Image: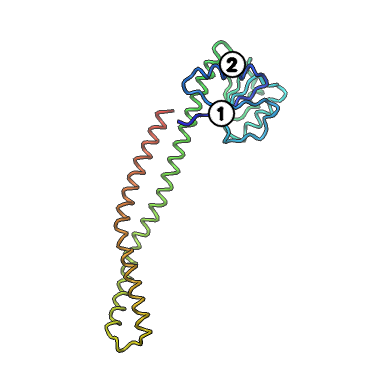
Amino acid sequence: MDQATVLIISDDPDFSRVVMDRWHGERNAPAFTLMSGDICRDLDADGFDMAIVGAVNPGILPAVFKALDPPGKPVLFVCKAKPSAAEARQGPPGVRILQQQEGWLDALVLVSAEVLRLGQAMARAHVAEQAAKSLERQAALGRYILNERHTLNNSLTSVLGNSELLLLEPGSLSSTARSQIETIRNMAVRMHEILQRFSSIEKELNAVEKQAENEARTRVRAAAASS
């Protein structure tokens, strides 16, 4: 599993320190990025997996929440007192609120770990889904070529047969015409050989489709188990 990154936004260095110290005691501790509230602007959505906001100057808290809204990452807001309904609405949609009561650090680590595991499971499921769609498109293209193989083969058989008949009457053809018909015949033979190879491609496509289905089911089960 890739190491997650947690963004801690706080104007109090002690808040960031106690959170990191508590989390470093866990086996799967994430990487941390620290930022104060006054420089929290234009956040890179790929730079972190979740954000923890705590001990931020109340005057700039709305701006912090506004900056966290576009990335769309999970946000855990740690506060000393339960915010009012109006204050809670200032946060991004889905923000989780945790009061600094007894045992709040343990609760923060537990909740954050579950949020990170869920996010990673959803990311793996999305990758598996996109891979399966890509394989489906490739398989559909391959199926189309295989279906058209018979039509092309019939057309080539006609071209090849007629060119062979013309070459059986050498006296009726000029040297230039004979050379051109031989070229047509030879190219038709080459195309016919290429079409014959599609039989092995069909077997390979069937094997790829079966493997993709098995891998997709395995990833989905793994994602569900880890969540």
Residue nearer the viewer, 94 or 199: 199
Q: Please count the marks in the image.
A: 2
Q: Of 3 and 91, which appears nearest the observer? A: 3
Decide if residue 72 is on the left or right side of residue 129.
Answer: right
Extreme residue in the top direction = 102
Look at label 1 and name its amino acid: Met
Quadrant hosting residue 32: top right
Q: Residue furthest bottom?
A: 171
- Determine which of the numbered discs, if any, sits on residue 21 in the image: none
Query: Residue 19, how many percent across, how many down?
Result: 57, 18
Residue 149 falls in which quadrant of the image?
Answer: bottom left
The structure residue drawn at horizontal position 34% and vertical position 40%, both measured from the top left corner, is 214
How far apart are labels 2 and 1 at the CA level?
A: 18 Å
From the image, tell me which residue sits under label 1.
50
State the residue at coordinates (55%, 15%): 105
x and y, in percent, of residue 129 in the image: 43, 41
**Label 2 crowd (10 A; few <14 / some 14-19 / many >=20):** few
In the picture of the structure, the residue carrying the numbered disc 2 is 18
Is the N terminus in the top left, top right, bottom left or bottom right quadrant? top left
Q: Residue 209 in the image: x percent, y percent?
A: 34, 47
